[in-house]
Amino acid sequence: MSTSTTNEEIVPTTLGGKASEYLDQRLGIAGAAKKNLRKIFPDHWSFMLGEICLYSFIVLLLSGIFLTLFFTPSMGEVTYNGSYTPLDGIRMSEAYASTLNISFDVRGGLLMRQIHHWAALVFVMAIMVHMLRIFFTGAFRKPRELNWLIGFTLFVMALAEGFCGYSLPDDLLSGTGLRILQGMILAIPIVGTYISYFLFGGLFPGTDIVPRLFTVHILLVPGLILGLITAHLILVFYQKHTQWAGPGRTNQNVVGLPLMPVYMAKAGGFFFVVFGFTALLGGLVTINPIWLYGPYVPTQITAGSQPDFYIGFFEGALRMMPNIEWNFWGHTLSPNILVPFAIVPGILFGGLAMYPFLEAWITGDRREHHILDRPRNMPTRTAIGVAGIVFYGVGWINGGNDLIAPHFNLSVEAITWVDRVAIFVAPAFAFWLTRRICFGLQRRDRDKVLHGRESGIITRSPEGQFSEIHTPLPQGDLHTLTSHEVHHPLTLTDVTDANGVPAPNLRLAKLRARMTRWYFGERVEKVSEEEYREAISSGHH
Amino acid sequence: MSGDMTHDEHGSVAVDEEHGHGVVAENPFADPGLPEHTPRLTDIDEKVARKSERIVAGLFLLSAIATIAFMVCYTEVPNNTSTIVNFFPLGAMSASNFALGITLGVALFAMGAGAIYWARTLMTDVEVPQERHLLESTPEDKAEAVAEFQQGMADSGWKQRPLIRRTLIGAMAVLPLPAVWILRDLGPQPGTTQRQTAWTAGELIINDASISLDGTRGRGIRPEDLQVGTLVSASPAAVLTAGDQTNNMMSMSAILLVRMNTVDIKSQQEIDWGYEGIVAFSKICTHVGCPVQLFEQQTHHMLCPCHQSTFDLSDNGRVIFGPAARSLPQLPITVNADGYLVAKAGFDQPVGPSFWERG
Amino acid sequence: MKSLSTRRRHPLAAFVVLVLGLAFVGTIFAAFLSPNSASADTGTSNAQAIANGKALYITSCSSCHGKLGEGSSYGPSLVGSGAAAVDFQVSTGRMPAQQPGAQIEKKAVLYTQEQIDEMAAYIDSLGGGPAIPDSSKYQVNDNLVQLGGVIFRTTCSECHNITGQGGALTDGKYAPALTQTNPKAIYEAMLTGPQNMPNFPDTVISPLEKQAIISYIVSVRNQANYGGAGLGRLGPTAEGLFIWTFGLIALLLFAVWIAAHTTKASAERVAQAAAKKRGKE
């Protein structure tokens, strides 16, 4: 980049050098470049899940901009006169007509619509998988609690964004979804009817909802998402990425490959791979064929009406909730709607958001953590996560009960009843099973440390006894398998002071002690050095 | 656990030749440090590296070709519902969408694959450590920051001037309120409109299937048009003149008519509100408002496809399964002077989903 | 002319005249007296067909529907059901039913169309009812597709699904898919309301409207899935399932490929390269 070899005066000769010099004289970028160009990132496939979210969001932005150039966000009525003959002469909203126009009369329009919708599904799916990875590896611990909250907020906004987005074409399927939303809003105590009338501009469906959702969908929520993604990435950069335990990897370093050139190429390449994959899906697999659904009319409906998958849990919860409703003093309170609409999601999402703080309170751990947990080494946390997945999954499956029923020759009533029971029983069972599996895996690791790996070679002693030769683990593996921390339950001390006065916050402290016993009461201790030496010296394989 | 366990030369166990069992190094679980870098074939063999280079270049070239192909297909492949390509095993599909999707997808994917292959085979793969800086600031920095802040507070006089402090907080607390206030005109107040439908005494019942495409003409229904087991989706005649209020009106006033044998109807009131076994019910589900219209002729059950609320139309529209809590409201009907079915009165209760003020 | 007159007194002349006469009458009969009009009046049309139909009925149907079609605890009365109902049930294989119940499944068709017509004539003779539609009534008419779509979405899609994939009813019953159903059966089903399906007489959905519905159903099911593979036309559920299986696995495989360590050179290749390098120096 320069011809000079001294540090005092660097005279750039290349174009890139001159441009950098220009910017540096105005922005002082050399400092940032010095720190970040060769920043080290660790390599593991599970660290790339967040990237899938980022790249699919960029795809959404690009394809979305194209769509806004052709979409008309209006519910004013027009008579269709385009290429799709089965709807020729039918009255419909401009929103629906313009979506048909994009699908059939704009070249590349159907491709862009499909890329946009597939990318939306990939976006939400990737967020869920990424969030689970963070959860199961404990990457949310200090100093990353704030990033967890940012990510959680991004998750909720992605759900809202998707719902708003697929409601824009004003087709029969998504219009039904809006109707259901309106029915749920009506059930909100005291302010429900007001919120509904303000949101829809009066009676349902009105003419305001699509233009309003359009503003939310292309301006408000994407703006928030962009801002939060920026904050999210800045924190990842600044706090550096976490890494798995291993030889040479400590809590004070990060081992991997440099941003320039390796990660620029890998991450940039992954962006094109995700984009290309979405484009191939857009060209090969139909998604949201709104021309088959027809325009939204409040008296029409289709059998097998489901929302996009990420709303499936709420749909299933609505279906399985028993029909409890209370009437008193001229008012109606509807738990049959509020529980699946607000209470259960509130608990689920609230618990999700607060988990890092809850676990920190339970463990009392105030240290920085940059080495990831293997899920098996935190059995209760892992079991809680699996139970949460199962809970969510039962609700999701019930959302498709009227498609599952005829397919498998069952009745919707039977499926609903099974799910009503399963939503309590299955997570409990999954919790128990997961913990047992984690302990089993921990014991297996322990055996591997003590006795080495099974080699598959059988030997026979002179006395006639068969045994398998175990090869001892290399040093690196021994280190990795013993570097985790085994937590112990916190014990209550100083319950009362010298005069018998109980300590303040005693109930909270007792609760905390009980929770640590739940978390760490049963545990598998690590192999100690003495045990290891004994195993080696006694010659046991 | 890193994806692969690196195998290094030195194990932690040295075999004691004399006694036939192992002797352990000082700390068996100590961190052995980063394993030594072992080269890839491309690192040591220039011929293999050049083959890699050709693969990467080929992928980039493929991307460029696909990009051009996209632009060619855009103009050359006609975009209409009759230009279809049959791509096994995915079936018949729009030729334009297929061509544009494949070319764009390959262009992007090949670009990405090229960059990744370059990184994996030719770029450095030497793992290096980088120290983490302590996130927490030094005590000196913290003290200095606190001192600056306190100096700033002292300069402002915040602590010495409680009157300023309190009025500022008070004014700031209310300042955001106009942002909420100004949204008042988002919509009208509900008033009693959630209780009203277009049905009044004498309103003619129109067969939905007979409504013209422009929404202005439709046929009435005579009792003899229906047999036992017939289902008719119906609306008030007012929808034919409702203009841009049609959807709003339908979302509250849609009804369905079914005809049953009066011996099968369990409620005398239901029979009285019907006409010769023809009964009219609101079509709006009392759960969250989907149109409920899956009528089973033999069981007289009416199923809502959204969340499977089931209503017994032979028993006052009572809920027999599902999350709906209230029975389907019935519309009293009779026949007018011309022999057409009309409403005898409006609904006796609000239709559709429950709401707080419903009663 | 002379040859004709010489054959007038041929011994077989009378026979030939009789055959020609019968053929003439039969042609007139077939051309002008269609089965439709025959079923409207019960007595006059093919007595033989009714008798045959009754015999078939006694063998296969009477155990559930009664000796005289009056019904029993296993099956409803067929008096007034009409020929169209019989044609629908038997020509789609639903009847004879395997067992009584609310949902009667489609199975292999047991009878020829002629036999079905005979049974239809018999049932029609018991008490009249909707007649088998003439083929012009269920001809696909491309100009009626739009109207048919609107009525289909108002009246049919809530049970049969927006593209006719079928749908769930209560207690394990279901509305069948319409993707393979022939137009005559669709017409007859609308007209007669088989099993739990409501009926839609011509006074409620006119013959033109029925034809429009049929035109729509056939047109949509023959339509290409413009965007690519149709995923069964089952909507967001199928799309979600697809992305969570195929999509997730593909993306994870890409991630694994990107992040995995590249294969290291074997020890002997490293030695080879070192030797080569030493050789060069």
Image: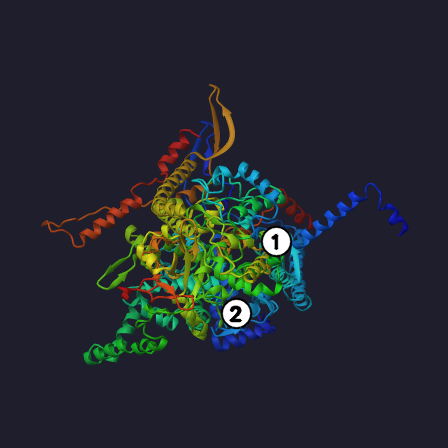
Query: Residue extending furthest front?
Result: C9
Query: Residue extending furthest left?
Result: A499
Looking at the picture, which amino acid does disc 2 mark? Leu
- Which quadrant of the figure contains the N terminus of chain A? bottom right
Q: Same chain for marks 2 and 1?
A: yes
Query: How far across and how far down the image is residue C115, in percent?
Result: 61, 42
Q: Residue at x 45, y 40 (%)?
A: C74
Q: Distance between the residues labelled 2 and 1?
A: 35 Å
Q: What element carries label 1?
A: loop
C18 lies left or right of A531? right
- Which quadrant of the figure contains the C terminus of chain A? top left
Q: Is residue B81 shown to the viewer in this render? A: yes
Nearer to the camera, A155 or B332: B332
In the rendered view, tell whether residue A99 sits above or below residue C239: below
A231 lies left or right of A458? left
Nearer to the camera, A338 or B242: B242
A335 lies left or right of A279? left
Query: How far across and how far down the image is residue A262, in percent?
Result: 55, 59
Label 2, residues with CA under 10 Å away: few <14, some 14-19, many ≥20: some
- Of the two numbered discs 2 and 1 on the same chain, state the one appearing first in sequence: 1
Q: Pointer 1: what residue?
A: B90
In the rendered view, tell whether residue B147 sits above or below residue A374: below
Query: Residue extending furthest right?
Result: C2
Query: How far across and how far down the image is residue B268, in percent?
Result: 31, 55
Q: Is mark 2 on a helix, strand or loop?
A: loop
Which numbered marker is on residue B213?
2
Mark in the foreground, 2 or 1: 2
Q: How many labels does the image show?
A: 2
Colouring scheme, one of rainbow, by chain, secondary structure, one colour: rainbow
Q: Subunit of mark 1?
A: B
Looking at the picture, which amino acid does disc 1 mark? Leu
